[in-house]
Image (tube, rainbow, N blue to C red):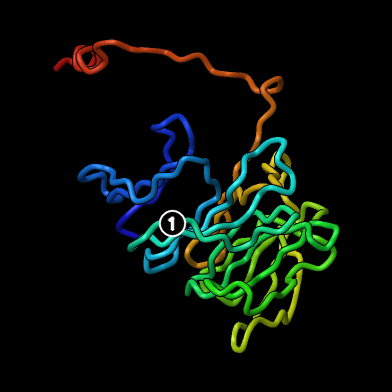
Amino acid sequence: GRSVFFLSRRREAWSELYVRRADGAGQARAVLVRDQQIWETDITPDGAWLVARAGGTQNQAGDRDIVAYRLDGDTAEIPLLTSNYDEVAPRLSPDGLLLAYASQEAGEGGVYVRPFPDVEAGRWLVSRGGGSMPMWAHNGRELFYVSPDSEMMVATVETEDGLRVRERRVLFGLPPGFSLSPLSTPYDVSPDDQRFIMVRTLSSGSVERAPLILVENWLQEVEARVGR
């Protein structure tokens, strides 16, 4: 929690990963520079690995893959999931040993989990009837995702000797305007796993935009009014 990783387009593309102290001290330091864009990044707890989705946001169906980079040495790109289907929304488990993602490999969107970094050592389907936008709970025993009916789901999982789904249930229906994105996970979970923070899209045609008011010499006016 002492540092923030972020993508930047300082070279006119979302192709650079920087890290900076969370208190704002010092300067941002580049830890990864690529020639092509990357999206939807996640970092292992020890800061040694970055996983990301390669492939853009438009007109690239089937060409979106999940790749990895080592940040503590050679940062050469390591392909993880590079099938003919889109693999998107990579999310690492709290211990960094499992990788959740969304894929259309079964003919519909679904949430899957694989070991990390050896993604070929196992593969488990978490969602039933489709799913997208996976997010691990901080306790590592639950995986949140969004159903095709726009419901927030939670799967209770066991992670010993692979992965086993014990239960799937609906938490709540998503509120109006929730930003649904098949290519990302536009929400986050509080550290106690009891609250969600989400992006809501507002229609510009129905929103009354308040005017911006600039007040000059505000402090002097206040002092004059209170007789100071």
User: Left or right: 225 with respect to 130?
Assistant: left
Q: Which residue: 75% across, 55% down?
A: 85
Name the image quarter holding residue 11.
top left
Mark 1, residues whose alpha carbon is within 10 Å: few (<14), some, or many (≥20)?
Answer: few
Q: Quadrant of the N terminus?
A: bottom left
What residue type is disc 1 on?
A: Ala
Where residue 154 sits: x, y (%)?
69, 68
Can you say whether 204 is above or below 46 in the image? above
Q: How many marks?
A: 1
Can you say whether 221 is above or below 143 in the image? above
Disc 1 target residue = 76
User: Left or right: 220 with respect to 73?
Assistant: left
User: Left or right: 34 with respect to 149?
Assistant: left
Where residue 33 sits: x, y (%)?
39, 45
Can you say whether 29 is above or below 211 in the image? below
Q: Quadrant of the C terminus?
A: top left
Where residue 48 sits: x, y (%)?
38, 65
120 or 163, nearer to the observer: 120
Q: Which residue: 81% across, 68% down?
A: 128
Name the image quarter holding residue 88.
bottom right
SS for callout 1: loop
168 or 216, nearer to the observer: 168
1 or 195, nearer to the observer: 1
Quick one: which residue is furthest to the left in this view? 228
Where residue 183 sits: x, y (%)?
66, 47
